[in-house]
Amino acid sequence: MDTIYIEKEVAAHPRTLRICERYPRARQIPINRYSDVFNSRTQNFREQKANPSLILAKKPGKLIQATPPGYHVGGENNYYFSHMLNCVYDCRYCFLQGMYQSANYVVFINNEDFFDEITRTANQHRSASWFFSGYDCDSLALDPVTHFVDDCLNHFEKTPNAFLELRTKSTQIRPLTNRSPLHNVVVAYSLSPAAIVAAEEHGTPSLEKRLDALKTLQDNGWQIGLRFDPLLYAENFEDLYHQFFDQVFESLDMGAVHSVSLGVFRLPKGFHKKLVRLYPDSKLLAAPMDLRDGLMTYPQSEELSMRKFCTDKLFTAINKNQFFPCS
Amino acid sequence: MNVMDDELLSPVKSYTTRMSLVCIITALPAESRVFIDSLKLKPILDHGWRLYGNSGHLLLQTGLGKLKSAAATSAVLHLHDDIQAVINVGVAGGTDAIGTQLLAHCVVDQGSGFSTYPHLPPQRVVSSLPSTTIETLDKPSDDYRAGVSFDMEASGIFSAASPYLSSGSVQCVKVISDNPDAPLGEFKKDDVTALVSTTVPVVNSLLDWYAVSAKQSSIEKDVQHLANTLTSKTHHSVNDKLQLSRLLHQHHALSGELPELTALPETTSAASLRTQLNALINEHPLRYGDSS
């Protein structure tokens, strides 16, 4: 990390100091609000991705949001939160590239405010609530810097009516394997065939390493989830995904998997347009696409066929009550 | 500016089709001279702007003050759409020692209070130069404050460049020329060239860095070149041109190369050209992995 922008309000916070200690040579630049840097309109996401800066800030306002419709793994009350904005990985299909002007990482250091709001929100409901982390970032990838997961697990350990999903592609699982598993935490991995990981998920751990991490977590008693989202179109789709699912099924105890979800590539029209502008030579953006309900996605017949192939394959290894297709 | 009329070259358009340019922007002739000499720049006749160039670089001398710097920057960026980055170099007042070189991490326009944060290059590129806030003043001042350096052009340049260039493509390197121990009143204009000369290594490093970045994105130029060739033969509306460019990129994404001109026989309409291109694209289905 070459440059760290620090909101003046959090400059003396112990977490800020600890993170800055990790990068003694980084430029430290004081700022008033993270949005002054992060939301500036003249930024180029692709340029910045080659040399991202870190922004340490206090997340203001509402910290917990309701999930979009259909975003759940069986719970009634579903929320997401983002202790960080942006991801250390560079997946070509990622919606964050369309959503944000900047590729810089924002790390919010007011963890306790997140936890207080999680408790307040969970206490509003009689049934358990789900809280999804990893919507605007990878939950584990920058954890050696943020140490968020440890704090988060400590909180959920004391909040049995709240369930946590940590969504990730990272193999940084030490904060989990260093402690006893929690009944109300699911570690969910986004998985894709190895050839797609190599071509479109730049900088991410290989499929093999992700499966190793999942197996370790499963062996340690943690509940795991599998997220096959996005499925990407290819002429050799069935070959790719057939081999891929076999590899997944051979690596894990599928009957013990908490939840499996699946969705095809889809992006809001504006995000897709921005992605095409940023990466005009991207292979996945050269696939045939239609605009449906404001989303750029594959033609309906293609989508149905991809979904059917994968669903049929999945049901050879899991039960229907483990399956939560994304709309 | 000591430029003889017979030294003047033809308008800069002769340079602009060759490669991406980085434009150094200075205010004073004494600042310009450093880069004119080190980069062997030649004067260019271009709408009366003080402009110098070679095959990869331009130097724009704007004159003093943010209005002049904004006007000149805006005009030159409008006229030369192949300028990939600009670097403002010059002297500044501050609390650091005379001769300290600084990279701007924030540029503030004192008049409006508006701040800009350039996306900074990696430290290795700028030899770990310390960074600072540059506040652009309307009038010279000796109200020195720690953590802030003063100039009179940077905010004008950043503001004018923002419609054209990203925040990582506008940088500002300043060298301290006056401070509380040697205030502006004692400043000798003759010292400017010597002070600015010290920035040559870091400016050269930035120029090299931008040149490497430009090479990495050269496919965009190849696509535009081919698109221009194709549209010169057949009428294309703006929308047609966008669709053509997208198809050329898709062909490149799927096949790893642009189509040969010979594979696209002359057509009578943009639509029939697209049909031809789509047929070529369909020869390269999207596949992943060893079986592709």
Image (cartoon, grey):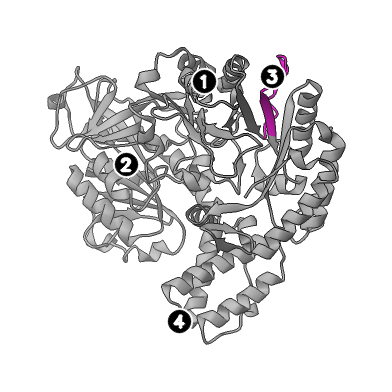
Secondary structure at badge 2 equals strand
What is the three-letter code of the residue carrying label 2?
Asn
Closer to the chain start, of discs 3 and 1, is: 1
How far across and down, in percent of the image, does residue A26 sit?
A: 47, 24
Dominant secondary-structure state across the stretch colored magenta: loop
Q: Mark 3 lies on which chain?
A: A
What is the three-letter code of the residue carrying label 4?
His
What is the three-letter code of the residue carrying label 3?
Leu
**In the rendered view, does B10 fall on the left or right side of B71?**
right
Q: Mark 4, residues whose alpha carbon is within 10 Å: few (<14), some, or many (≥20)?
A: some
Badge 3 is on which residue?
A182
Badge 4 is on which residue?
B235
With respect to residue A7, does B245 lie above or below?
below
Towards the viewer: A169 or A23:
A169
Residue A119 image label: 1
Badge 2 is on which residue?
B88
Towards the viewer: B33 or A227:
A227
Q: Residue at x 74, y 23 (%)?
A: A222
Q: Do labels 2 and 3 share a chain?
A: no
Q: Mark 2, residues whose alpha carbon is within 10 Å: few (<14), some, or many (≥20)?
A: many
Q: Which chain carries label 1?
A: A
- Image marks 3 and 1: residues in contact by CB distance under 8 Å: no
Q: CA gap, disc 2 to disc 1? A: 51 Å
Which range of residues does the magenta coloring cover? Answer: A169-188
Q: Residue at x 23, y 58 (%)?
A: B4
